[in-house]
Amino acid sequence: MITLIVILVLSVIVKIYIARVGHIYKEQEFYSDAKTLKRIISYVKDNGKKLQLGISTTYYPNGSIESSLTYKWGKPHGVHIYYNIDGSVEHKEVFKEGQFVAISD
């Protein structure tokens, strides 16, 4: 439920920023086999710098999600979820405007 709320709030923030800046870029990184996805990030460019915005997802080599992280203007913001290779949640971290707030199992 918290993750859904974070996603909805971030989508509103992203839409506001798109109206102001114009472009959100997505970048994909693959493992050495060039087929297996390793990471997806979204970002905006601000004075030539990449600022992560929205959800960044990393993957294990078997394709399962390793982490799901949220960013706001290049800083960690919201719930960051880390997964075990079997897909179970390892732990969660909460950030606000780049500052660590809490951790949970």
Image (cartoon, rainbow, N blue to C red):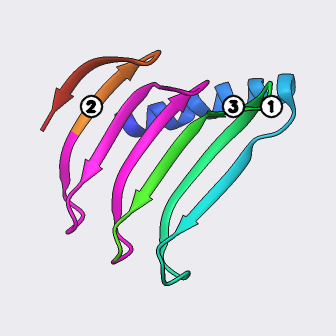
| Res 9 seen here | no
Going by the numbered disc 2, the residue's amino acid type is Glu
* Numbered tag placed on residue 93 in the rendering: 2
Residue 105, x across and y down, in percent: 12, 38
Q: Which residue is mark 1?
A: 18
In the image, residue 24 sits, relative to residue 90, either above or below, namely above
Q: Nearer the viewer, residue 10 or 50?
A: 50
69 falls in the magenta region: yes
Direction from residue 22 to residue 24 in the image, left or right: left
Going by the numbered disc 1, the residue's amino acid type is Ile
Direction from residue 66 to residue 97 in the image, left or right: right
Asked whether the residues under the numbered discs 1 and 3 touch, taking CB atoms below 8 Å apart as contact, a structural biologist would say yes
Cα–Cα gap, marks 2 and 3: 22 Å
Q: Nearer the viewer, residue 25 or 92?
A: 25
* Numbered tag placed on residue 14 in the rendering: 3
Residue stretch rendered in magenta on the structure: 62-91
- Residue at 66% across, 25% down: 13
